Image: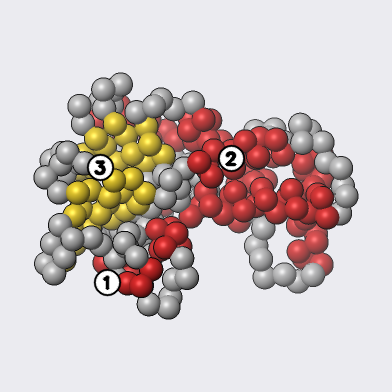
Amino acid sequence: MSTYVISDIHGCYEQFLLLLEKIGFCDTDRLILAGDYIDRGAGSFEMLQWLENCSENVVPLRGNHEEEFAAYTDLMLWFDKKEKLGTDKTSNRDTKVLYGTLQYYFRKNKSRFYFGAYGTVLKLLEDAGAALEDFCRWSALIRRMPYFAQCSGLEKTCIVVHAGYAECLEELGSRFSRLEDFYLYARQESIIMGGKQHAVIIAGHTPTIAEGGFSYNRGNVFRHYDPQKDCVFYDIDCGCVFRSRDSDAKLACIRLEDEAVFYV
């Protein structure tokens, strides 16, 4: 039995399946997914379907893109109630009207809020024929996802999280008002403020192809060791969704038992 971690699939559904095949993932293994399954790539719908039907040996964690997707759903429900639109939740056509009306509302009011970022909501409406009830079901799935997972039985405690892990809010100063925001949005703060004594933290969120970024490593997994905490931090977001413009970009997987890394 092995435990694998993959992060930041971002709609790269075919590459995700190839990576599962490469590691020989099976029913006796465990797979922890560290968030950001959707947006940017072409296979967001396929990833949502896969998550809905995944087996019990898969542990999907919440990423910031899922958090924002659920917020868009909440917004559509709020707007439908506020304007008394009476949207039929089972109707793709009605949901498209709701979406368009909400977009117009924000443009008219010159709001800085960008509803439906990355075009995923619109793509699900137009290409997948989704309706509001589908968005509600996917959002409920997201809200059941934990922010992090802790693995025992290894040489060191291992914590998998989307962006960064800290044990208490007091460690973070004033930049983050909630621990959950640190779990979802931390970048360099994850190695400056975060971590845990005698632990391994595995995260994604910041692509290792981003020159100038704290975890830049030419599209390979980034590793940082904090001697004060005896804590190892891995960034396994290797920017797969940007592969069309960066030849170093790839989808990565790490096996916890021996920290072996796999790529497609």
Q: Amino acid at mark 1?
A: Ile
Task: Determine whether, in the image, residue 79 is placed left or right of residue 163.
Answer: right
In this picture the colour scheme is: secondary structure
- Please, is residue 101 above or below residue 137 in the view? below
Q: Which residue is mark 2?
A: 140
Residue 22 visible in image: no
Residue at 44%, 35% (x, y): give it: 13
- Badge 3: few (under 14), some or many (20 or more) residues near its Cα, within 10 Å? some
The reply to whether dot 2 and dot 1 touch (C-beta < 8 Å) is no
> From this viewpoint, which residue is outermost toward the top?
27
Q: What is the CA distance from the residue labelled 2 to the residue labelled 1? A: 33 Å
Q: Nearer the viewer, residue 252 or 234?
A: 234
* Residue type at the position of mark 3: Cys
Q: Secondary structure at mark 3?
A: strand
Q: Secondary structure at mark 1?
A: helix
Marks 3, 1: nearer the viewer: 3
- The residue indicated by pointer 3 is 151
Q: Earlier in the sequence, mark 2 or mark 3?
A: 2
Q: Which residue is mark 1?
A: 192
In the shown orientation, is residue 94 left or right of residue 65?
right
Residue 214 in percent (x, y) is at 29, 68
Instruction: Give the SS element for disc 2.
Output: helix
Q: Where does residue 207 sit, x and y in percent of width and height?
A: 35, 57
- Judge left or right: residue 129 versus residue 143: right
Percent of width and height locating residue 115? 67, 58
| Quadrant housing residue 59 | top left
Q: Is residue 23 left or right of residue 84?
A: left
Q: CA distance from mark 2 to mark 3?
A: 25 Å
Q: Nearer the viewer, mark 2 or mark 1?
A: 2
Q: Is residue 17 depicted above or below 68 in this figure?
A: above
Q: Quadrant of the C terminus?
A: top left
Tell me the residue at 65%/62% (across/down).
114
